[in-house]
Amino acid sequence: MKRLGIMLVLSILVLGCVGQESEVPEPEYTVDVTGLAQGTITLADLKENPSEFTAVLVKSTGTEIENTWKGRLLTELLALYNVNPAYISFVAEDGYMITLQMEDLNNAYLCYEMDGKELTLEDGGPVRLVISDQPGKLWMSYLKEIKLIGKENALIIHGKTKVVLALTKEDFERFDKKTVEAEFKGEIKTYSGISLTMLLNQARYEDDASTIRFVARDGYVVELDFTEVYSNEDILVTEDFTLVMPGYQSKYWMKDLAEIEVL
């Protein structure tokens, strides 16, 4: 009888421990800050002295939806990192990414609440980017990462493109690589990198593009016919930002490529 009592007490203790383990709260949702600075933004950060404001989301169809939001200004949150990015890339949970110039983000908020209720997955939460003076297509749902990008740590592709690409060396891992053999200054070497054609497709160049300009970090500039360059799929950009130009004179090859502008 005494043994039975001990077993009963042990069973209760074990069940109690199991119950306690099952009640361990899930980790708090965070938005990662990467690039020029490293850190995290938590829901608790957003709830510390938040702003409440009304904004109108304008869809591509012209439909307008007005909601009341609660969150914090992006510029206020980033002030803690003491950096001055030229661009910011916002990355969603599924990997979708948009890139905007810092000057277009003065009215950008990271929001956790809409119309008095915390954002659910159906609302694009737990954290959503709301830019009150920009089109609704830029209000990213399921925000997971903020990449702070400066001209010193990225290749910028812009101009007559539907989107701006600001690619760090880490971003190059997302693209399929191509290998070519090419002659440079009388020596044949093998080069591996991302096809320039692929990058231009990612930036979604405009139909009336006529010229492409390559700018090195030291200010050296080369301009070529856009159609001619776009049609050459062997032109590569390597992970160390070298422009590989098979079939072109060495003066068109470029180290430390900083910018590709479509004109």
Image (spheres, helix red, strand yellow):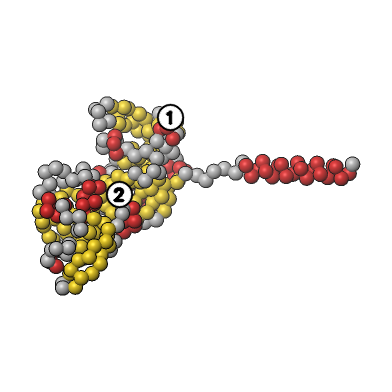
What number is the disc on residue 47? none
The residues tagged by marks 1 and 2 sit, at their Cα atoms, a distance apart of 29 Å
Q: Is residue 253 above or below residue 95?
A: below
Q: Residue at x 20, y 62 (%)?
A: 244
Residue located at (16% from left, 46% from top) = 160
Q: Residues within 10 Å of mark 2 (few under 14, many from 20)?
A: many
Residue 162 lies in what quarter of the image?
top left
80 and 248: which one is in front? 248
Label of residue 88 in the image: 2
Three-letter code, disc 2:
Ile
Which residue does the image show at 39% across and 43% down from the upper left?
A: 94
Q: Quadrant of the N terminus?
A: top right
- Is residue 235 visible in the rendered image? The answer is yes
The residue depicted at 25 percent of the width and 28 percent of the height is 61
Mark found first going from the N terminus, 1 or 2? 2
Badge 1 is on which residue?
Answer: 116
Q: Is residue 168 visible?
A: no
- Amino acid tagged 1: Gly
